[in-house]
Image (cartoon, grey):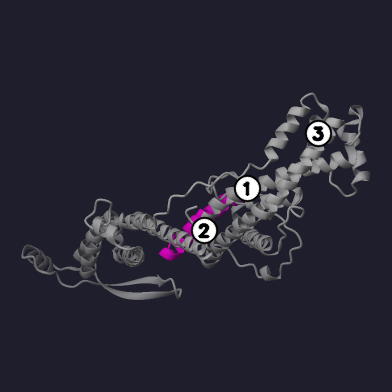
Amino acid sequence: MAETTDYKSRLSEVLLARKDWLESSELTRLKDELRNYQASFSSLYTIYLKKGLINEDPYKQETKIGELEVPDTGSFSEAERVEQLSIRLSNYDNQLDFLVNFYQFGVEFLNLERIKRILGLVRYVDWVHLSPDSQSANTRAVAELTNQSKSGVDPLALSVIGESLTKLSRSTPAVMVILKELTDYNKEAYKLEVRTAVTSGMPAAEATAANIKKKLSTALPGKPFYQELVEELIKEDYSRDGPILQETILKSLKLEDAKPKAVKAPVSFKAILLEGIQVIGSVASTFAEIGSKLDENENLLANQKRSFWEKVKRLMQQMMNKEPDEVIYDIQYMDSTKGVPVRERVNFHHFRSDLDKRIRTLASLGIHGAAASKLETMSEDQLTAFLEKTIRDVQNFHRTLFALDDFFKASAPKEDRDKIKGVKPELATVKNAIVRANQIRHEYSAQKEEEEQMRRLGINPTV
């Protein structure tokens, strides 16, 4: 029993050091990651509501939460889909809010049962593998909901969706790692407590799970009995492999000695901005494909309305390189800031000329483009302003092109609608580039702000 007593002493020492480390470092990180997780989900939840994909819970603000509870994870029929998602996601949003803003983050408070509840919330939707083919009913439904929310939204909202999904998929594994650290601590702390209060001095013949369970209720009233952990304790303290198992546990819990930190290479903020510019510049070829299709659609629509002599006149204008007659289209799109439809008169040929100019400019932004060397000489502030302006310009073109696509489809005679060339796939490619460029811009801002804060605190960010 001397070996067991020595093990308890050593185990108590490493657990105390690990507890201090968890309290001073990991729990702060856990709360930060969960805060990011909750904010990202809240952004998605708001978009689902605005798009009318789920219904608002009229009792959401009146819900009182005393302890974390994982919402329903069972399957549901297609007829129940909207109702179930509305209830579940509202409850989920409330639970995350309670976790981040009202839950205690202390090692003693976050016992095995509470860790299990947090784990259930983090696993409620598999953001890392969000797919309509998921085996999880909630993950499958949320994946479909998210795909639906991307259709017909403005580039800014699409950027929010993309950024939220990225943060959720990043925070999930980070939270899981910290929860595992807390779980490992709690398991060994539980076994140490049982050793001290129940099995201390207990002969091997009496060291059975059933016997320990009986004595536990008397020695530690209200303490839960974990069969698996008690069986581990018996193997560690009474089996032939016990000493090896004990050493393995002590080694796993011992904190590594602090090593001198290597000097970090300074972050190249210009490189981040140049990457964002190259990403948004990549839409040049896609815009060219869209422009070609729109020209065909405009020609098809115009030929339906022109008389024979007007067609001859058009042909003569082309032969003599004369400007064609103005073609004005009345289009409509949604104002993302006000949430109201906006009507606009577009001079098609002027618009196409502007689009061609934008295509040439965007094409020059590549690594080997004509503007590459000039971009290299620009300051960070100049690059930031240029990236933001280019993203805005591409967003404006995307909005007009989306409206023109709808206009051509609606204006063509029924018998010719199958001849109209849609550009939705190409527009989706442009949207993805806008989202990625915006993400890079946000990453730049976040890293820049973090470095500046460190400098204000007198910390060298390269150390």
Give how far across and how far down residue 409 sits, in percent.
32, 62
Type of amino acid at the residue the image marks with label 1: Met
Q: Does the magenta stretch include residue 164?
A: yes
Q: Do the residues labelled 1 and 3 touch (CB within 8 Å)?
A: no
Which residue position holds label 2? 164
Element on which disc 3 rests:
helix
Q: Distance between the residues labelled 2 and 3?
A: 43 Å
For this rendering, which residue is in front, 38 or 452?
A: 452
Is 240 placed above or below 254 here? above
Mark drawn on residue 231:
3
Type of amino acid at the residue the image marks with label 2: Ser
Q: Nearer the viewer, mark 1 or mark 2?
A: 1
Instruction: Identify the residue at image location x=28%, y=51%.
Output: 367
Type of amino acid at the residue the image marks with label 3: Glu
Mark drawn on residue 176:
1
- Tell me where residue 234 sits by quadrant: top right
Give how far across and how far down residue 35 sits, in percent.
61, 60
**What is the chief secondary structure element of the magenta stretch?**
helix
- Tell me where residue 184 sits by quadrant: top right
Magenta residue span: 137-166
Is 285 placed above or below 246 here? below
Residue sticking out furthest to the left: 320
